[in-house]
Image (cartoon, rainbow, N blue to C red):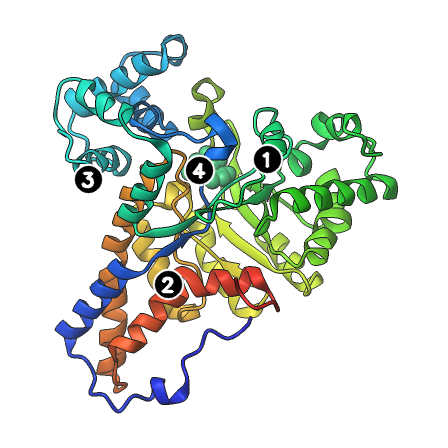
Amino acid sequence: MPSTTLSPSRLHSPKPSLDAEGIAQAVQEELNKIQIIDVHTHLFKPSLGSLGLWGIDELLTYHYLEAELFRSSPITPEEYWKLSKQQQADTIWRALFVENLPVSEATRGVVAVLQAFGLPTDSPDLKEAREFFASQELNGHISRVFQMAGISEAVMTNDPLDPEEAPQWERATDRDVRFRAVLRLDRILNKWPEHWRILQSQGYDVELQISTKTTYAVRRFLADWCKRMHPVYMAVSLPDTFQFPEESPRARLLEHAVLPSCREHNIPLSLMIGVRYQVNPAIRLAGDAVGKADLRALENLCRNFPDNRFLCSVLSRENQHELCVYARKFRNLMPFGCWWFLNNPSIVEEITRERIEMLGMSFIPQHSDARVLEQVIYKWRNTRRTMAPIFTNTYKLLAEDGRPVTHEGIHHDMVRLFRGNFEHFVAGNREPK
Ligand code: FIX
Ligand code: ZN
């Protein structure tokens, strides 16, 4: 892992240590100032057309809120899916924001976004909010939202087999510096039997069997998409039952196509482990759950493929400690984010404290996983709010134990956590962009 270090003269500053109040102030200042790289989102650059979701109706029909709707309203999923997008948003607004106080993390998030734009947070309907968002020009709105969220870039999730997205890449050749691409491989790795024919129809000499011919052709497919997308990493989400090695198309494609391709293009593979897919299909995207995974699969990958770099986020609370321990064993492993059901202050606090205690500042604390543009506003505000006291306490302990803490040192760490670690890890032995 290339260095993100301070020069000795700057670390061993003659400057007196900040006192407790000074530390808290410096942490707040640096957290407010840092322009974060949001390393995993489901946002899309505008040139990818209508894939990018934004505005009040999308904010309200977010699958986190749909899950909460079915707990606080008599409407059935079948009835809900028959409604138009606007009717769905109206239903969620009424049930979770008018008839009940929006106290959950996800509902409070919508309130924070409305407040950020100076819109009423307690009106009986969505008329004013809809008029406001309808009056926004998308490109300018994206830049304004990124500025409000304090992020410089959003890393997308791009699926080369998505029938809606794939054709867009033929046209979307622009390099929008606000967005970075990622080659998402869930369909190839988790659902090969259902998807290999799509590659064949595109002229890749693959078959159901994961033969050498197939792995060679899949590597060609990945190389073509790397040329088209310039991905910062490849990524896959994996079930709680994920095993490696194992006799499966997924394990063979990983070993003989994806990992070699990542080495060839010198980019990491991101493993997001621990999903129990569609435990309740009736509520669609909201129907996924979590399961504790056997992380020996990760251990085997990190040990057996030392020339590959692995970004990793695990969904189960019970897997967090193991992930920290494995990161202490393997420098080609970078833990990132408090993913999905973990992105709640009480759990973010627990995970982040444990990571600092075990890894110092050598991890990526958070990602937003935003599916709707304006979500980055509340998700990063909440992250800053939750992490400020954790970082402050960390430095207070360091000062108490006898090491002077300076504003400069804190600045260095915030840059490292929210930019440097990611940039260096994805760059590998190249100079980061
Ligand atoms: O696999 C993923 O990237 C997950 O983040 C999503 O599938 C999930 O639906 C989500 O939105 C989590 O926040
Ligand atoms: Zn995601």
Q: CA distance from mark 3 to mark 2?
A: 32 Å
Give the residue type at disc 2.
Answer: Glu
Identify residue for label 1.
159
Residue 68 placement (x, y as % from top left):
30, 26
Q: CA distance from mark 1 to mark 3?
A: 32 Å
Q: CA distance from mark 2 to mark 1?
A: 33 Å
Between disc 3 and disc 2, whose residue precedes? 3
Q: Nearer the viewer, mark 1 or mark 3?
A: 3
For the point 28% across and 23% down, the residue is 134
Is 315 in front, or is 96? 96
Q: Nearer the viewer, mark 2 or mark 4?
A: 4
Between disc 2 and disc 1, whose residue precedes? 1
Q: CA distance from mark 3 to mark 4?
A: 20 Å
Q: Nearer the viewer, mark 2 or mark 1?
A: 1
Residue 201 placement (x, y as % from top left):
78, 25
Label placed on residue 43: 4
Tell me the SS state at disc 3.
helix
Labelled pair 1, 3 in contact (Cβ < 8 Å) = no
Dot 4 crowding, Cα within 10 Å, few <14, some 14–19, many 20+: many
Tell me the SS state at disc 4.
loop
The quarter of the picture where residue 252 lies is top right
Is 49 in front, or is 254? 49
Compared with residue 377, is residue 163 higher up or lower down, i.e. above or below?
A: above
Give the residue type at disc 4.
Answer: Leu
Residue 5 placement (x, y as % from top left):
44, 78
Between disc 3 and disc 4, whose residue precedes? 4
Identify residue for label 3.
116
The quarter of the picture where residue 376 lies is top left
